[in-house]
Image (tube, grey):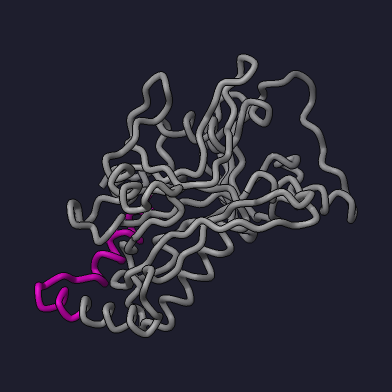
């Protein structure tokens, strides 16, 4: 295995809740109120739609695509959803520092350094440019066409990250560590808060498949696990292989993918697209409230 290269789940498509649009000569992210499944190929109109996008929309009877049937690839919740604090370079868009609130991996002149991570609000190095950033890999449907080919949902939404992390931990616990066998569904939800001036904020939730109770989903998971074992599938070995693959590299995202990620989640204004010094975030209660408002509006 090549050292320094993170081995991540094979990706055959993307799940997004928005797109990048050109406005006043700048390419900026624009949020949406429905899911879109795309391929990994871009054209001049943006990301090309995946065939599954049309299939799922046919089942909605003309309604917006706000739920997607999925399964997890791994039993370990932290392998399906990887979340961290990420600071991207303002000129190249490449990651400079990735941390978890305790330790971080920071790119320096001598290579990658491991340092304490105080979190984005207290980090003098980040100067307010650090964001929570997560990636969720799922199988759409039951993985009928490709049992290991995943769709990736990338997000900087605290609402989405916190909700998905909780759901994955809970489903893993109640199913007896059978998370990869649970019939689940990504669902787009909306909420309003006073800090968002009562405008809708959309985030991603994870629930059992439509029409099923939690008990029925757990029974399906038990039956699926037994069938997998009878077929010789070793889920524990798959989880361990993924764990070693993620640990093999300092940063998960490939250099060729970073520009598109930075464009979607870290637009030009935050990556050096404007002149002048980097603004230092306000301190105290006002600064914290303003920071929370900005993160929720971006969610």
Q: Is residue 233 above or below residue 86?
A: below
Image position, residue 94 (x, y; %): 53, 32
Spot the residue most to the front.
61
Residue at point 50%, 34% (across, down): 19
Residue at the farthest top position: 25
> Which sits in the foreground, 110 or 4?
4
Q: Residue at x 26, y 72 (%)?
A: 236
Q: Please state the extent of the stretch shown in magenta in the rendering.
A: 226-248
Q: Position of residue 122 (x, y in %)?
A: 77, 52
Q: Residue furthest left?
A: 231
237 within the magenta span: yes
Vertical order, 216 against 24 (above or below) = below
Instruction: Tally the marks.
Output: 0
Q: Is residue 239 left or right of residue 106?
A: left
* Foreground of the two, 33 or 24: 33
Residue 143 at x, y = what percent?
Answer: 23, 57
Residue appearing at x 56%, y 64% in the figure:
163
Q: In the drawing, does residue 112 fall left or right of residue 216? A: right
Q: Is residue 148 magenta?
A: no
Residue 185: which quarter of the image? bottom left
Prevailing secondary structure of the magenta residues = helix
Which residue appears at 32% of the width and 77% of the height?
178
Reply above or below: 128 against 190: above
Q: Between residues 294 and 67, which one lies in front from this camera angle?
A: 67
Q: Position of residue 9 (x, y in %)?
A: 31, 51
């Amino acid at each position: 295995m090549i050292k320094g290269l993170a081995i991540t789940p094979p990706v055959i498509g993307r799940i997004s809740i928005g797109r990048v649009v050109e406005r006043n000569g700048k390419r900026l992210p624009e949020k949406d109120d429905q899911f879109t499944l795309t391929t990994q190929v871009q054209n001049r109109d943006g990301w090309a739609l995946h065939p599954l996008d049309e299939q799922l929309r046919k089942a909605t009877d003309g309604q917006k695509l706000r739920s997607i049937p999925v399964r997890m690839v791994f039993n370990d919740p932290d392998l399906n959803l990887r979340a961290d604090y990420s600071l991207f370079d303002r000129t190249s868009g490449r990651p400079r520092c990735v941390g978890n609130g305790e330790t971080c991996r920071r790119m320096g002149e001598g290579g990658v350094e491991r340092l304490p991570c105080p979190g984005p609000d207290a980090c003098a190095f980040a100067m307010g440019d650090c964001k929570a950033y997560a990636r969720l890999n799922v199988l759409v449907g039951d993985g009928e066409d490709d049992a290991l080919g995943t769709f990736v949902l990338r997000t900087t939404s605290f609402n989405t990250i916190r909700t998905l992390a909780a759901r994955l931990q809970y489903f893993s616990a109640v199913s007896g560590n059978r998370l990869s066998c649970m019939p689940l569904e990504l669902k787009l939800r909306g909420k309003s808060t006073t800090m968002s001036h009562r405008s809708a904020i959309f985030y991603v939730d994870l629930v059992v498949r439509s029409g099923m109770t939690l008990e029925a989903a757990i029974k399906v998971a038990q039956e699926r696990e037994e069938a997998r074992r009878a077929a010789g599938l070793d889920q524990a070995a798959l989880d361990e292989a993924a764990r070693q693959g993620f640990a093999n590299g300092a940063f998960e995202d490939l250099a060729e993918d970073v520009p598109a990620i930075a464009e979607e989640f870290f637009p030009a204004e935050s990556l050096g697209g404007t002149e002048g010094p980097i603004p230092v975030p306000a301190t105290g209660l006002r600064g914290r409230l303003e920071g929370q408002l900005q993160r929720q509006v971006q969610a």
